[in-house]
Image: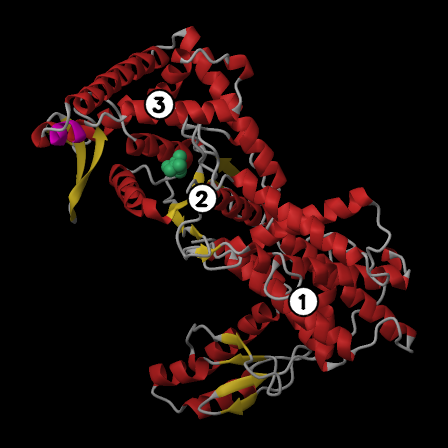
Amino acid sequence: MSTDSRPPTDPTTILDARFRAAIHAVSALDADPQIRLSTNPNFGDYQANAAMSLAKETKGNPRDLAGALAAKVDLAGIAETPVIAGPGFLNIRLERSFISAMLQAMDNASLGVEPTKETHAAVVDLCGVNVAKQMHVGHLRATIIGDTIARVFERLGRKVWRENHLGDWGLPIAMTLAALRRSRVDLDRLSLTDLNDAYRRAQLEGRSDDAGLAAARATGVGAHRLAELQAQAESAGEAIQDAKATLLRLQGGDPEVVAAWQKIIDCTMREVYASTSTLNAKVGAEHNRGESFFRDRLAPVVEAFQSAGLAKEDQGAIVVPFADRERPLLIRKSDGGFLYATTDLAALRFRTHDLDGSRVIYVVDARQRDHFKDVFDAAAMIGWDRTRDGNKSEITHLGFGTVLGKDKRPLKTRSGENFTLKDLLDEAMERGVAEVTRRAQDPNAPTHGMRHAELEWVGRAVGIAAIKYADLSNDLTKDYVFDLDRMVAFEGDTGPYLQYAHARIANILAKAMDSAAQIASAAHAVHEPAERALALHLLRYPQMVLDVARTLETHRIGAYLRTLAECFNAFYQSCPVLKSEDASVRQSRLRLCALARRVLQDGLSLYGIDAPERM
Ligand code: ARG
């Protein structure tokens, strides 16, 4: 569990403490006061719901208990005397001066988000691309969700390790290397297309159609077809032999093979980094710790499980059996080879122990659920689920759903291929640029007359926001339909809508022409109901960030920002800012605008979404 305390500027924190004291005074119990947001602002801003459960525990009357709490609780300078409702709810209306004071306290560089006291690191397994393969839509999710989780922990001041567990080792790579050598491709001029072709060829060559051959023999197809199938089977055998020999040379550190291997990694990663940078996701070479990193730790993993008596031999292979299920975890094949799971065991131990991660989060396709369950359970059995100082780490597989096409099937191009990430991003940015350019034609648009290069920058930011928001603002475990038309719209539940809301506030502030210092020196006054609603929502920002760190539910950020945009719109509709007659009211409203703008920008930055000043 996180040791983070509640945000000091959130009214809930203070109400919780005051009611806790009152409960203790009234019942001698230390109980959760159950402070909740009020469901109806007409009755108050918050409610304390503890009386009902307390009454059950003390065998008292809930309304009487509520009355006693209302009389006892010290809310001087914080709220009016609570009002009892229904079976024993207490409705709480905050004092204006208290809301202003809290806003004042939150309106600093950190926006009320306090640095964590946790000194252990958080480790985020993200991206996870495979060498020699194009990055596809699935890696989009692993990259941007992982990046957002990392940003949230970083926002809380935590040490974060972004670990790109690159698939850069093993037989598939050796197959590609061997195929490249056979086709005499110049590795210094290697393009990703060459690499993909080689990968595909290697996969085809390696697939011997033994079953087809047997069936052909049995059904007695023509001699020609039989010969064809036989040749394929034989060359498949050769391709596999070639690949196995190449793998041995790679594993043995043969300089020529290692150099070729490094070149195909570089070629793959150039494209990956181009995409992560377009996506505004912080994944670069410094986050690279692929499967190959763990190659010397695989034999020791197996030995450790064996000497702990946790592994056993099964037909020449080594497996880790579990008490509660049939399926064991295979950690060494009968031919002596290691597996994906062996590498993940080594990596997990590295993350908890060497990186000192007390929180380790695997942002990987939900379809790998069983794999991670087995790896985590095996690691717990051997005690690798602990930080260097022996604290138990919280280890999570954040399994995300599949990106679907409009036909509700996994997203494919028209010719049936996986969409490459690059195609998708290019199209989204094109759409963004087209939309922004179209809008700029309106003479009243703030972007009217903007330089072409700048419009293009805004348009690209819109396209990327569209994709990222659509991905991050839903329940991550669910599949979702990739619908660019809907995602890129300025209206509705979209990233561009939030960017637009931000740009509108920026526009108001620009029109006001007051300096930032002038605005910051105004008092936060909260009079109108819409101002109050906006202020109360702003005060919830730090808790929202903590909640995302705790639950890993990135959609909470989107939901928070959407409500913020709505509160702001309601405020701006009912409370004149620039046209306000009273200078001090104008100033305090501008200050509220400025704070709302910064919170929107900060929240969008957790998604890695840019917030242009003009749109
Ligand atoms: N390369 C893997 C794949 O494409 C994902 C790696 C996920 N991370 C891990 N530690 N297993 O399926």
Q: For label 2, count other residues whose C-alpha is less than 10 Å away and answer few (under 14), some (14-19) or many (20+).
A: many
- Say how many tags the image has: 3
Residue at image point 78% right, 69% down: 524
Which picture quadrant has residue 200? top left
Q: Secondary structure at mark 3?
A: helix
N-term-proximal mark, 1 vs 2 = 2
The numbered mark at residue 270 is none
N-term-proximal mark, 1 vs 3 = 3
Quadrant assignment for the C terminus: bottom right
Examine the structure image and report whether residue 233 is included in the region drawn in magenta: no
Residue at image point 12% right, 25% down: 316
Q: Residue 540 location in percent, x, y?
A: 61, 66
Residue type highlighted by circle 1: Ala
Which picture quadrant has residue 103? bottom right
Q: Which residue is under mark 1? A: 565
C-alpha gap between disc 2 and disc 3: 22 Å
The numbered mark at residue 138 is 2
Examine the structure image and report whether residue 213 is included in the region drawn in magenta: yes
Residue type highlighted by circle 2: Gly
- Asked whether, in this view, residue 445 is left or right of residue 66, the answer is right
Residue type highlighted by circle 3: Ala
On screen, residue 464 above or below 257: below
Residue furthest to the left in view is 218
Q: Nearer the viewer, residue 62 or 420?
A: 420
Quadrant assignment for the N terminus: bottom left
Q: For label 1, count other residues whose C-alpha is less than 10 Å away and answer few (under 14), some (14-19) or many (20+).
A: many
The numbered mark at residue 202 is 3
Q: Please give the range of residues in magenta.
A: 212-216
Does the closest atom of ligand 1 sit within 8 Å of the Cβ of label 2? Answer: yes
C-alpha gap between disc 1 and disc 2: 30 Å
